[in-house]
Image: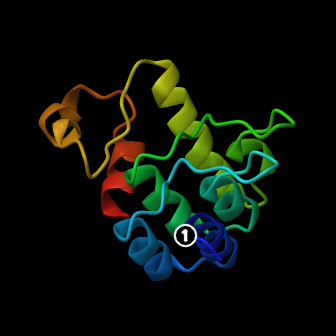
Amino acid sequence: MDDTAALHFASQKGHVEVARELLASGASVKAKNRKGFTALHFAAQNSHLDLVKYLVKKGVDVTAKTKGGQTALHVAEDDEVRAFLKECEQSLKKGAELPSEKDDSAEKEGDSKSSGEVMKDVEDA
């Protein structure tokens, strides 16, 4: 099993620590399987909110679509996961950048963001 398949499996099962290790060892948060699913799709579909928040923090594309045109929001089963992803998408549409570990500008500009709660959720992941 390669790192991408392992990350997708960990995301299906909600294993945040395994996902951390895989990403640290070089797995790509943006990798898709043959159907176009990312780790975020799997985490959202299986109601793993903590992992969804962590993947967003790691820079996953919340608007990435499967080959069938579905975003993680479309496949999310849980109301909290759906609400979080919807807020992320709305923040992006308003021009906000979601905070990531690669970019600390969210902390510097946090007060200017219109979706402060989303930003805090991501930073707390």
For the point 65% across and 52% down, which residue is it?
A: 38
Rendered view: 42 above or below 83: below
Q: Position of residue 74 (x, y in %)?
A: 78, 43
Question: Within 10 angstroms of label 1, few (less than 14), some, or many (20 or more) residues?
Answer: some
In the picture, the quarter occupied by the N terminus is: bottom right
The residue type indicated by label 1 comes to: Asp
The quadrant in which residue 115 appears is top left
- Quarter containing the C terminus: bottom left
- For label 1, the SS is helix
Residue 116 coordinates in the image, percent (x, y)? 34, 39
Q: Quadrant of residue 45?
A: bottom right
How far across and how far down the image is residue 37, in percent?
A: 73, 50
Left or right: 125 as drawn, with respect to 37: left
**Residue 97 position (above or below residue 38):** above
Residue depicted at x 72% and y 39%: 71
In the rendered view, tell whether residue 93 sits above or below residue 106: above
Mark 1 — residue? 3
